[in-house]
Amino acid sequence: MTLKTRNSLIKLFFIFSLVCIALTLVCLSIALITKNIVPPVNLRLPEFLLFIPFSQYNLIATLVSTGIMMLYVPIMLLLLMRYFENTQSTEIIFFSGAVIGCLCEGMRFLILLFGLWQSYSQLLFFIGRIVLAGRLLVPLSFFAAATMSETSQRQNVERNATVLLGLSVVIAITMPLNTAQVTTTGMIVTGFAQVFTIVRVLIFLVTLASFFINARRHDSIELTKITIDYAILMIGYGCLLIADNFLFMGIGTAALGIGTAYFLRNLHRLYMWK
């Protein structure tokens, strides 16, 4: 993939993310005017959180956390266009895929705003599968960034990116959904939920190990820092996914912001020296 093609795609995704945010604001405005915000009450995080400060359930925290995930997308894409426009980095392509995966979280707004969780419509299934695809695309994209970024793989980047996207979509389509159960974060409970969570955690651990092995093999300080930055970034991402309270919202926002900033900074330094 040429720099021109990559930059054009990033610009296209940037515009698309702004359109999605604008449509979300319209939906939010309509829901506020019509008083049609119905928070799910089916499933909550473990009860011991009730005794921790700022961990009580709050719909506003859920909405803000979801909004942060959406705003994260155009901000990151803007930074990529600003600082990596002339950088031939395969990692940037896969990082862009992870960022687009975050945009899928915005679909949860529809469930939270219009009480869609009370229905069993095809739209509810469709939204759930989009969110699932995004939650697979994020860890898989970082896995690809850690394992498929060698010079020898640059000719296959389009193929690898297509495979990752296709795999995420296929799994999301085939994954059973239990629309009778919706968490307080506006996410439909999946079949084999524990297995799905374990698989994503394993992908995270393998990716972390891959970054670390690359750092040791190349004896690179930047790659070592990138490994740490990735861990912080993903902790923040994970906290925002389950944030139905201000505690997780604050931790997630801080960790995601700090982890991403240092991840991109060290990645820029890595290729600047090259």
Image (cartoon, rainbow, N blue to C red):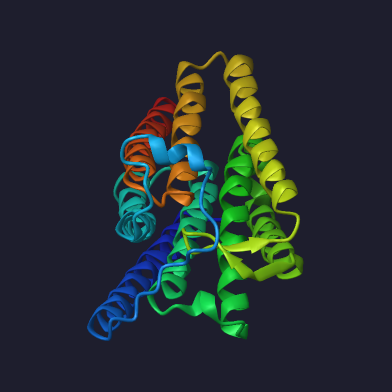
Tell me: residue 198, above or below residue 9.
above
Q: Is residue 8 left or right of residue 149?
A: left
- Front-lying residue, 127 or 74: 127
The number of numbered discs placed on residues in the rendered structure image is 0
Tell me: residue 128, above or below residue 84.
below
Residue shown at 53% from the left, 60% from the top: 183
Residue 243, position in %: x, y? 42, 49
Q: Is residue 132 left or right of residue 81?
A: right
Residue 50, position in %: x, y? 41, 41
Asked whether the viewer can see residue 88, the reply is: no
Tell me: residue 49, above or below residue 138.
above
Q: Is residue 122 left or right of residue 232?
A: right
Viewport quadrant of the N terminus: bottom right
Residue 80, position in %: x, y? 36, 49
Residue shown at 64% from the left, 16% from the top: 217
Viewport quadrant of the C terminus: top left
Residue shown at 67% from the left, 39% from the top: 203
Residue shown at 68% from the left, 51% from the top: 156
Q: Is residue 190 left or right of residue 256?
A: right
Asked whether the viewer can see residue 18, the reply is: yes
- Front-lying residue, 44 or 174: 44
- Front-lying residue, 175 or 120: 120
- Front-lying residue, 160 or 155: 160
Residue 254, position in %: x, y? 32, 37
